[in-house]
Image (cartoon, helix red, strand yellow):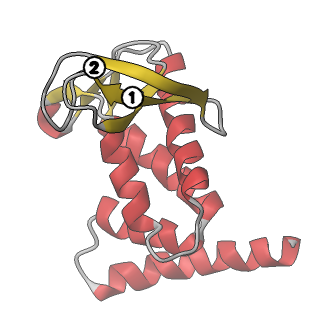
Amino acid sequence: MRCPFCAHDDSQVKDSRPTEDGTTIRRRRQCEGCGARFTTFERIQLREITVVKSEDRKEPFDRSKIDLSVSLACRKRGIAQEQMDQLVSGIQRQLETSGENEIPSKRIGEMVMDGLKSLDSVAYIRFASVYKDFTEAKDFEEFAGSVKDIGASDLNDK
């Protein structure tokens, strides 16, 4: 593993343990060149996934894009990082086990929306406002009204 500080090619693993959700291994490393310590995370990748974007443009699946979108939607909502990581890991697992090598970006967006819907209604609305490309306040208001109905039934269940 290349050192992020001095770019030396060799490092020694000092500690290794699984994360709480068991989908990642956290490794604490020390550079043999400069002695700096850093952490790496390893995830299991079952298959190479290609995302089919609009206009049939294709690009490799990048988990960090979903991570960023989810964290932006959940910003200042009091949602634990572990919950967001589990959501993203679950989506990635579904994609990898689907048996398909090419996945439309629209399906990934819908999976994120479904996950956020069950996690937090405000985060769900935030993501939807970008994903569905609301152009007017009216679009936002109509969508939020439909979510309000969902949120009310969720509150009655608790």
Q: Are marks 2 and 1 in contact (CB under 8 Å)?
A: yes
Q: Quadrant of residue 31?
A: top left
Q: Could you tell me which secondary element the residue under label 1 belongs to? A: strand
Give me the C-alpha separation between circle 2 and circle 1.
9 Å
Pinpoint residue 127: horizontal percent, then vertical percent: 40, 64
* Residue located 67% across and 72% down the image: 150
Amino acid under disc 1: Arg
Q: Is residue 129 above or below residue 23?
A: below
Left or right of 46, for residue 130: left
* Mark number displayed over residue 145: none
Q: Nearer the viewer, mark 2 or mark 1?
A: 1
Whichever of labels 2 and 1 marks the residue nearer the N terminus, that label is: 2
Q: Quadrant of residue 21?
A: top right
Q: Nearer the viewer, residue 152 or 97?
A: 97
* Residue located 30% across and 29% down the image: 61
Q: Nearer the viewer, residue 152 or 89?
A: 89
* Residue located 76% across and 71% down the image: 154
Pinpoint residue 57: horizontal percent, then vertical percent: 13, 30
For disc 2, the marked residue is: 1
Left or right of 28, for residue 56: left
* Residue located 41% across and 12% down the image: 47
Quarter of the picture containing the N terminus is top left
Badge 1 local density, few (<14 within 10 Å), some, or many (20+)? Answer: many
Q: Could you tell me which secondary element the residue under label 2 belongs to? A: loop
For disc 1, the marked residue is: 29
Pinpoint residue 119: horizontal percent, then vertical percent: 62, 61
Q: Quadrant of residue 34?
A: top left
Left or right of 130, for residue 28: right
Amino acid under disc 2: Met
